[in-house]
Image (cartoon, rainbow, N blue to C red):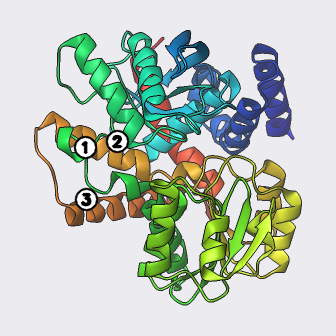
């Protein structure tokens, strides 16, 4: 009861300091619920107000971005960089270009990044940024002009030992390349200030695949802990960006059967399973042609469900890889009743708090994004290392390193929360991520 009262008191204070920021409130509650009992058992963290300090960003930078479209019109967007915590390394986290971007979403993502980066065991702090700019429907020249204007301001706040952004939703190789070129022009130096770069100028192999591969590796680790594997399992995925596409690629390589993908228009259900040839078509469709998922259904004569989510499809394993809060309480009940045995978050916070409770109550294996989708930022950390020592590693070497990092993250989750046969991966990930950052903060004093 004391911990519940303490949690309520803590959340009341956080909401008063951050009014209306619902996504941020949700992300903090999910962590605080796990770590509050641990903090109460270890008063040194309570006396130093570590959780209060950890939930306040070091700084939130907001700036205007003015650019010119192809018709010669001046356009205005808002840019952000939320530098959340650099206790264990320089700020590290993606840039998101999407109309939904606001301070609440970036604070939730930056806060999550604190724990995710801690779990990788690499020396990386946490940040997140972006703009309410939508690259969809824009020409390459318009995207270039926006990225150059955005980086002109952002360049004042980042650096290879200060803050190293990466890509996220709406920010791929094209956008990273334009921003890196502008940073180089402004600063007159060639440094690894961004990750996700092209191979020709300091990028890393398998960076595109890393988040998806990591999610599949984490699922394999969870199942292996129970003496099982992905092989032979029917898998339902949402999304059709890099995370979903390459999660599917690794699932197929591990012997699983992928039957769904989705985008903002709906989802496809291929009962026969999506093989390597079909996946190659889908990668080209979504990555290079920027087409709609319905085109896959037309080509391969499978079902397409307009404006629906895939969670009603019977499956053994589920991988939400699209966006936040895409699995709600009812979706969770549906997954349970349809016999799903494990859920791995490929996206950031795609499962509501109520839905997580349903999955855990039913004893489904559930891996939160801060653990399961850490493969992307882990590979970014490896790209930073390669830039620092002016060398590159092979794809095979990088994949082995990534697999070992995901194995280590899984072991940390198990270490900090195993209750008989059922592992609460949410508690395990939150406590393991918290301890490393909290101890560094304690060491620095006030």
- The residue sitting at 61% across, 19% down in the picture is 56
**The N terminus appears in which quarter of the rendering?**
top right
Label located before the other in sequence (2 or 1)? 2
> Which one is in front, 395 or 173?
173
> Which one is in front, 418 or 344?
344
Q: Residue furthest front?
A: 71
- The residue sitting at 59% across, 35% down in the picture is 109
Gap in Å between the C-alphas at discs 1 and 3? 13 Å
> Which one is in front, 57 or 72?
72
The kind of secondary structure element at disc 1 is: loop
Residue 23: quarter of image = top right
Find disc 2 in the rendering and name its residue: 196
The kind of secondary structure element at disc 3 is: helix
The kind of secondary structure element at disc 2 is: loop
Observer able to see residue 86: no
Label located before the other in sequence (3 or 2)? 2
Observer able to see residue 274: yes
* Cβ atoms at labels 1 and 3 below 8 Å apart: no
Q: In the rendered view, does 170 fall on the left or right side of 439? A: right
The disc label shown at residue 203, or none = 1
Residue 87: quarter of image = top left
Q: Is residue 40 above or below residue 129?
A: below
Gap in Å between the C-alphas at discs 3 and 2? 14 Å
Label located before the other in sequence (1 or 3)? 1
> Which one is in front, 176 or 339?
176
Find disc 3 in the rendering and name its residue: 398
């Amino acid at each position: 009861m004391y911990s519940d009262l303490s949690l309520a008191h803590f959340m009341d204070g956080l909401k008063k300091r951050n009014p209306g920021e619902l996504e941020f409130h949700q992300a903090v509650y999910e962590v605080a619920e796990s770590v509050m009992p641990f903090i109460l058992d270890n008063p040194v963290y309570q006396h130093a107000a570590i959780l209060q300090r950890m939930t306040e960003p070091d700084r939130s930078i907001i700036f205007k971005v003015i650019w010119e479209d192809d018709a010669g019109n001046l356009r205005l967007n808002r840019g952000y960089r939320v530098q959340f915590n650099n206790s264990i390394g320089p700020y590290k986290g993606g840039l998101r270009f999407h109309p939904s971007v606001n301070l609440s979403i970036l604070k939730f993502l930056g806060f999550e990044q604190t724990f995710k980066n801690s779990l990788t065991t690499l020396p990386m702090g946490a940040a997140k940024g972006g703009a309410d700019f939508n690259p969809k429907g824009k020409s390459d020249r318009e995207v270039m002009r926006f990225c150059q204007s955005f980086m002109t301001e952002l360049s004042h706040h980042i650096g290879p030992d200060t803050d190293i952004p990466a890509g996220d939703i709406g920010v791929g190789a094209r956008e990273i390349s334009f921003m890196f070129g502008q940073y180089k022009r402004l600063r007159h130096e060639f440094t690894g200030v961004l990750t996700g770069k092209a191979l020709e100028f300091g990028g890393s192999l398998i960076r595109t695949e890393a988040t998806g591969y990591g999610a599949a590796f984490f699922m394999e680790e969870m199942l292996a802990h129970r003496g099982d594997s992905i092989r032979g399992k029917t898998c339902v995925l949402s999304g059709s960006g890099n995370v979903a596409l390459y999660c599917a690629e690794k699932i197929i390589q591990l012997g699983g059967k992928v039957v769904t993908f989705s985008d903002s228009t709906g989802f496809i259900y291929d009962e026969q399973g999506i093989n390597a040839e079909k996946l190659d078509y889908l990668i080209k469709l979504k990555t290079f042609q920027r087409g709609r998922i319905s085109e896959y259904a037309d080509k391969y004569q499978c079902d397409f469900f307009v404006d629906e989510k895939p969670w009603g499809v019977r499956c053994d394993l589920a991988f939400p890889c699209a966006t936040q809060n895409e699995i709600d309480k009812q979706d969770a009940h549906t997954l349970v009743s349809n016999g799903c045995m494990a859920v791995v978050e490929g996206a950031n916070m795609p499962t509501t708090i109520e839905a997580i409770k349903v999955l855990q109550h039913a004893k489904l294996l559930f891996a939160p994004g801060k653990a399961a989708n850490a493969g992307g930022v882990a590979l970014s950390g490896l790209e930073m290392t390669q830039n620092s020592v002016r060398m590159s590693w092979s794809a095979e070497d990088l994949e082995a390193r990534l697999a070992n990092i995901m194995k280590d993250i899984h072991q940390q989750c198990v270490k900090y929360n195993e209750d008989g046969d059922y592992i609460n991966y949410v508690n395990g990930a939150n406590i393991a991520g918290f301890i490393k950052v909290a101890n560094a903060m304690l060491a620095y004093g006030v």
